[in-house]
Amino acid sequence: MKLKELESCLQQVDGFEEPKILLEQYPTSPHIAGCMLYTIHNTYDDIKNKLVADLGCGCGVLSIGAAVLDAGLCVGFDIDSGALDIFKQNVEEFELSNIDTVQTDVSTIGSSFAKKFDTVIMNPPFGTKHNQGIDMQFLKTAISMARGAVYSLHKTTTRDHISKKASDWKVKMEVIAELRYDLPASYKFHKKKSVDIQVDFIRFTPK
Ligand SMILES: C[S@@+](CC[C@H](N)C(=O)[O-])C[C@H]1O[C@@H](n2cnc3c(N)ncnc32)[C@H](O)[C@@H]1O
């Protein structure tokens, strides 16, 4: 599938109806989600026939993209039942059968799913809403769940910190791309409608 086709397919995914600010419910745009998934699939072959987890899946744009690209199964994890209801409606509309959901707090997963997935993909909360450190909790959990690679988005300002943690956790870290992420203003106490932040698209693999 071409990148343009994937992007236009992801434009059909419905987003949050009433986003919960404290859960950082802003969706990954079809453009960014498309570029991430296209790279994971075409450059690294980490989606087709793989068991994929999507942490903080929200309404499912990354999970649905992975399923459309022929993941063996993609399982979306999110704490919020409202987001998962929209996720399930999206799955019905796309008529996908290789997709499932688990409602849970990702920060409490611990080692329950240790090495159970081939690939983990995520756009985690950045930890800017009285939830400082949640991004690193998501990352630690993702690394424990994956037999293969973890693909994640992180604020570029946290790159040095993440690099130190990656070294502690004995994983290799590669910044695949630097992106401008259009964050709704309510997440940054900003007067403008939205504000661009610099975000790294990172691949983590076992050393
Ligand atoms: C930035 S949004 C990304 C949503 C979706 N993955 C996407 O790409 O559009 C972060 C998601 O993490 C979820 N979330 C926040 N805290 C969580 C937690 N502790 N456990 C599980 N999910 C959480 C939110 O409900 C939200 O859906």
Image (tube, rainbow, N blue to C red):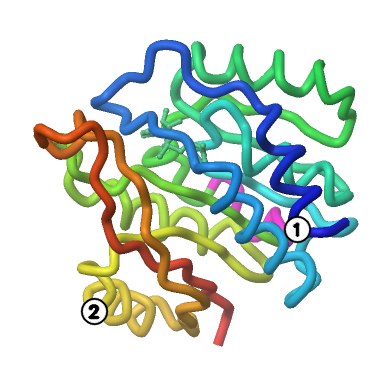
Where residue 154 appears, as percent x and y from the top left, is 36, 60
Total number of numbered discs in the rendering? 2
Name the residue rendered at 79%, 33% in the picture: 99
Query: If you read the primary sequence from the N terminus, does the residue marked by circle 1 or circle 2 appear first?
Result: 1
Magenta residues? 112-118
Q: Is residue 165 above or below residue 141?
A: below
Residue 184 versus residue 114: which sits nearer the camera? Answer: 184
What type is the residue that disc 2 sits on?
Answer: Asp
For discs 1 and 2, the disc positioned in front in the rendered view: 1
Q: Which residue is mark 1?
A: 3
Where residue 89 appears, as percent x and y from the top left, is 71, 13
Q: Is residue 57 left or right of residue 5?
A: left
Name the residue rendered at 47%, 35% in the picture: 27
What type is the residue that disc 1 sits on?
Answer: Leu
Q: Which residue is mark 2?
A: 160
- Disc 1 crowd rating (10 Å Cα; few below 14, some 14-19, many 20+) is some
Name the residue rendered at 27%, 56% in the picture: 197
Give the quadrant of the N terminus. bottom right
- Disc 2 crowd rating (10 Å Cα; few below 14, some 14-19, many 20+) is few
Where residue 67 appears, as percent x and y from the top left, is 81, 42
Quarter residue 148 falls in: bottom right
Residue 91 versus residue 72: which sits nearer the camera? Answer: 91
